[in-house]
Amino acid sequence: MNVEALDLLATSVFLVNERGHIEYANAAAEDLFGRSRKQLGGQSAATLFDTPENIQSSIDRAAGGRYADVRQLASLRRATESVEVAVTTVGLTGQRWPVLIETREIEQRVLADRNHRLVDEIEAHRELLRNLAHEVKNPLGGLRGAAQLLEAELPSAALAEYTQVIISEADRLQALVDRLSGPQRVPLNARPVNIHEICERVCALIQAEFRNDVTIQRDYDASVPDLKGDAARLMQAVLNVARNAAQELVARPQGPQTEPGVVTLRTRVARQVMLAHRQHRLALVLSIIDNGPGVPDHIRDRIFHPLVTARAGGTGLGLSLAQDFVQQHGGIIEFESRPGRTEFRLVLPMEPAN
């Protein structure tokens, strides 16, 4: 068995001897259990879980060759929190280590499945919109051309006001169509990007636009390295999400008990992250957090779909385009929301985008 390949997995893996003592732990195991390989080595794997007798029984039966694998739910203690996990114990025939234990954090597994579905679903909607945009473009061009010809034949210059309305509205619709169909056609201008420089530019723009209505807070991990990406598109993605948060804060009902609006930008590095059906050793997580009313229930499942908005006067394109730009970099935007706290996370691979 090539144990080095196990470090590429997003799930925690132990290789244990017939007594159930750990002889190998991969990088994901270090993250999940919050201990180094040196600390994990030689320990009884069962004692790392809250139900050691059940895990040890599975190890004993696997080591004895009484079954191929067994799956069970368990929990483990990590720092001050209890983490629910799915544990698979596998008997290995003819290998140096008789038992392999795979542990997945249940929340992470559900999140990965949800993200995969989201990517596929959004791509289907984009394809539909691209087809619709193509069908709309030709009639718009004809409408604008006809209005220009009509304007040239008008007996009174005062009547040109009406043809100008037709032309300007046709141009507005053309711009909307271009926004729906354009981003996918232009290749990324990928260069090393400092994400904190982008965050600072976004903070300055949000502060200038919303002034005293919104307070900007920063929580940066200074160790985050540069990533390879298109600075302009990443800037637009971060700005769209941050502006959306600020707009929700300003639009919420105000009262004597209403807390001041706060938007926080936080950066962290995550390890062994699954993005767009690919495993990445390192990923940047840029969180944009606000203390607003939260995402309405009726649009939660569709919030990244084009033209979906709960705000009066909104186009429903800001979050859709942000998701599009992030996915072009091999990443994804995910969110968690409840009244008083909404967090949008832009997760981007640290490796160069393809």
Image (cartoon, rainbow, N blue to C red):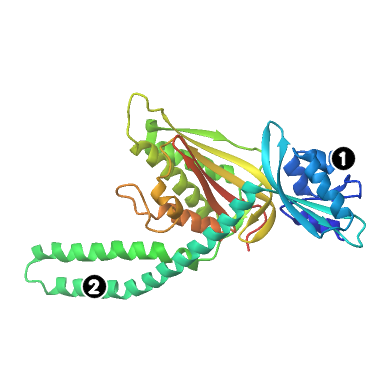
Residue 64 left/right relative to 333: right
Percent coordinates x, y for residue 336 in the rendering: 51, 44
Give the residue type at disc 2.
Leu
Can residue 192 be seen at all in this image of the molecule? no
Mark 1 / mark 2, whichever is N-terminal: 1
Identify whether 40 is placed above or below 58.
above
Which residue occupies the foreground of this view, 63 or 220? Answer: 63
Q: Which residue is mark 1?
A: 43
Q: Quadrant of the N terminus?
A: bottom right
Q: Give residue 5's quadrant in the image.
A: bottom right
Tag 1 secondary structure: loop
Percent coordinates x, y for residue 210 in the rendering: 38, 37
Residue 344 left/right relative to 178: right
Specify few, some or many for label 2: CA neighbours under 10 Å numbering under 14, 14-19, or 20 or more. Answer: some
Residue at point 60%, 52% (across, down): 110
Specify few, some or many for label 1: CA neighbours under 10 Å numbering under 14, 14-19, or 20 or more. Answer: some
Percent coordinates x, y for residue 328 in the rendering: 55, 60
- CB within 8 Å, label 1 to label 2: no
Query: Disc 1 vs disc 2: which is toward the camera?
Result: 1
Residue at point 50%, 47% (across, down): 238
Percent coordinates x, y for residue 16 in the rendering: 87, 49
Q: Which residue is mark 2?
A: 143
